[in-house]
Image (cartoon, rainbow, N blue to C red):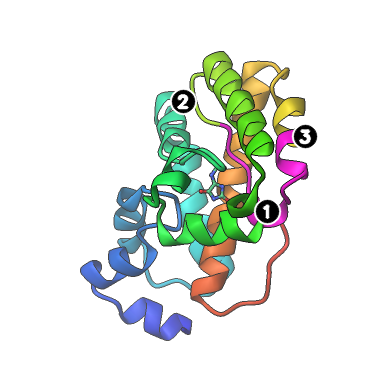
Amino acid sequence: MDMEKVNSMDFGEFVEVFGNVVERCPLIAAAVWSQRPFSDLDDLEKHFFAFIDALPQEGQEGVLRCHPDLAGRELQLGTLTAESRREQTAAGLTSLEADERRRLAELNARYRARFGFPFVLAARRSGRAAVPAELARRLHRPRAEELRAALREVRTICRLRLADLLGAADPAAP
Ligand code: 2AL
């Protein structure tokens, strides 16, 4: 898909196509549509990032809370979004042994209890061994620092999803 096509989309089509580049936050795509035309992928993603950055802290935490746990209940139930399923599969999280799944569930629960939002990581940039290691490492950070780190991961996920939609090469982390 090229930028000409993106810029020609009406509101409904744009939200349908880009509504999940930030997990379960179609409102962001709805707001970004008003800012067209976009010059390129970097320009388009800049608008998604700017929306998230401009949110008050409760809004930013809300964005994090829209993310399903990695290797969590939604994966077991088959209720993940297509994008999330693809990412969790790429990281090997759909083929964990029972003890790996239990360990991750325990770490996810501890993280959520400490910070009040779920652990978020760009799964495609990770792997089944790296996810629990990173989770254990981030579990002990100060809250403000961790919020910033989690939002960086949201931006990376968004960047990768946009690049997929636009057929761009795997981009560097933002
Ligand atoms: C996710 C997800 O759904 N995709 C991804 O890369 N990370 N979720 C999460 N809690 O980090």
Q: Is 83 placed above or below 64 here? A: below
Instruction: Give the structural element (helix, strand or loop) at label 1.
Output: loop
Crowding around mark 1 (Cα neighbors within 10 Å: few <14, some 14 to 19, many 20+) is: some
* 129 within the magenta span: yes
Name the residue tied to disc 3: 133
Instruction: Give the structural element (helix, strand or loop) at label 3.
Output: helix
Q: Position of residue 153 (x, y in %)?
A: 62, 44
Residue, x 68% and y 37% (percent of image)? 100
In the image, 59 versus 78, the foreground residue is 78
Specify whether tag 3 is near ligand 1 (CB below 8 Å): no
Question: Callout 3, which amino acid?
Answer: Ala
* Label 2 to label 1: alpha-carbon separation: 20 Å
In the image, taking residue 84 as reference, residue 104 lies left or right, namely right
The total of numbered circles placed on residues is 3
In the image, 122 versus 15, the foreground residue is 122
Q: Which mark is residue 174?
A: 1
Q: Which mark is residue 57?
A: 2
**Toward which corner of the image does residue 54 lie, by quadrant?**
top left
Residue extending furthest front?
Answer: 98
Question: Callout 2, which amino acid?
Answer: Gln
Crowding around mark 3 (Cα neighbors within 10 Å: few <14, some 14 to 19, many 20+) is: few
- Which of the marked residues, 2 or 1, is nearer the chain's N terminus? 2
Q: Position of residue 145 (x, y in %)?
A: 68, 24
Q: Nearer the viewer, mark 2 or mark 3?
A: 3
- Which of the marked residues, 3 or 1, is nearer the chain's N terminus? 3
Q: Which residues are magenta?
A: 119-133
